[in-house]
Amino acid sequence: MSDIEKNLRAEAKKLLEEKKVDYVIGYEESNGKVSPCFIDNAKDVEKLVFNPGCVHNLSVYLLEADAENKVGIVAKGCDSRAIIELIKQNQVIRDNVFILGISCDGVKDLLGKDYDKCKNCKYPVPLIYDVLLGEKKEGKEEDYSDVEEIESMSLEERKKFWNKQFEKCIKCHACRNICPLCYCEECALDDKNWVSKSHKFPEIWMSHLIRALHTAGRCVSCGECERACPVNIPLRKLYRKIGKDVKELFDYEAGVNAEDVPPLVAFDLDKDKEKIKQN
Amino acid sequence: MQNKIIKKVIKKDKIKNWINELMKNYKVIAPVKEGDEDVFFRIIKSADDVCMDFQNTVLSPKEFFFPKSEKIFEFEGDEISDSGSKIGRKRILFGARPCDVHGLTILDNVYKGEFNDPYYLQRRENTTIISLACSEPDENCFCKSLGTGPVLCDADIIITDLGDRYFIEAKTDDVNLVNFDIIKEAAPGDVELKDIKQKESEDKITRAIELNKNLDDLHLEAESRKCLGCGCCTYICPTCTCFDVSDESMISKQKGKRFRCWDSCMFPSFALLAGGENTREEKSDRFKQRFYHKFKYYPEKYGKVMCVGCGRCTRKCPVNTDVVKIINYNKLDCNY
């Protein structure tokens, strides 16, 4: 057992025994596969694991917590950004969460391959936590080469590329449901007056583009949408493009600094008009 | 089965020639590789596109019988035009895995008999199925415990990998599909080797789902806690049959179309009634419904469970919900 795992269990046990939290959201393992789990009782903390299979961004479960619940949550660097953003967007009350931050060495899929998000991970250490497990470490430089590759395509090529990808979409909404920042109680994608339920062009484009634009300034690039997609649409490329634009236009990176005002809140039509035009 | 079975073999390097022959008279739906490792069923334009080396396709071939969305009719003013779906050329579904062929027989029960679904049935009747037996089932497969296996299924023709050649079993009705010079009569050794290969792949399937469990004893509520409520498991399932009917209309021009599309019992809107009442409001209610439908309601009506053991839901669930683990749960070893 790694030190991180040992300390994680000890911290979780303490939290539950001292009744500082009602439950802890963490990871468990069965049949060689890791999945999210909820520990309600201190005697169950031995179930908790932390290993390279712990890819899930557990902060999505904070949205289900009742306002009076105190919740402990295991968070890697990327996951912590979602928590910051959720606090900022008034979806989570800071005092209601105890963040068991983990300094992450990267996570791997079942075949042992690194996830793309880990290859250029900027924030391996959580940006918000109550206790940090593991040593602090440096992140990598921002690398948008995946987005630039698509930006360099002609309009026709890009359209062909995304058409081929979106044609695969079965509208299972796994990308939306796994997204911690998709917290709307009523989603435009469920309203046929906004988006038809058809899988045909152009409806299928509308579904994806509405979501992409709607998560602008909120998407923390955790890559869960892409991982959840059963037909492997490279959604992270789409959302990172939006993230890159938001960064360039508003100098804003979601979930990094709790003090930064979200661009949709800070946007000033008169002041920002020129900037938008130039881009 | 009344049909006599014809046994033949074809060299692997002649498979494309065979598909080319079939394409002369049929629209052929076959596995095609897209991206690095994903294989999907597509209507092929060339035999060169066909991929014979895959574990299973990302999606089952269900969508070629029950499309993701399909037009039922169009309307303009008081006029209603005929059904959108027309019977096209005769089709061959080539390379479907036995579990997915089994999946179609489960859809048949719902779409045929008590109510006949013309859209589904015309596609089904118009399609001959050539199944490709599995030689490398993966750790999530459990088809053997559900009455089929990596080879056995109700396809019109089944082909099995023998190394440098494929063994072909065809019903006599389909003799014209295997009557080509490139396809030879099977030798007794081929039949023997086929049985060995079949046994080998059957032995690779180590998972089994327990049948006739009392679902009330299971921990469905606890298991539902991590469920995200997406429709992934239902849409990739070869046996899920639910759909919704919807209109796309341009009120200003008084015209539009009615279509149907896949729907999922995992979505809150599925059980939403007029007036705003929802019979399955909680995520746990919806999660339970999926299990009760597959392992209780359907079996009560049709005598077998609504699952073929393809393992897709377990493989693809973003939070690793494992159907076999949930069903096989034994309250005596109380692992919760």
Image (cartoon, coloured by chain):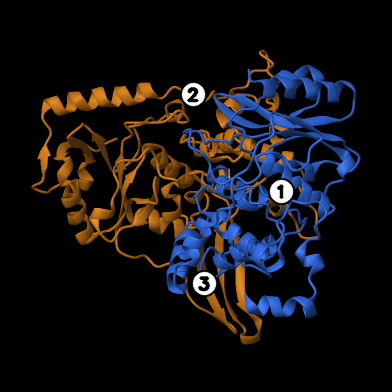
Residue behind mark 3: B73
Residue B11, x across and y down, in percent:
14, 40
Residue B290, x across and y down, in percent:
63, 40
Regarding residue B5, the answer to whether it shows in the image is no
Instruction: Please tell me whether residue B222 is drawn above or below residue A194 in the rendered image.
Output: above
Residue behind mark 2: B208
Q: Which chain is blue?
A: A
Residue A79, x across and y down, in percent:
69, 42
Label drawn at residue A180: 1
Given the image, on which type of amino acid does mark 3 rest? Phe
Label 3 and label 2 in one chain: yes
Nearer the observer, A234 or A119 = A119
Nearer the observer, A43 or B65 = A43
Circle 1 — which element? Answer: loop
Label drawn at residue B195: none
Which of pointers 1 and 2 indicates the residue nearer the eye? 1
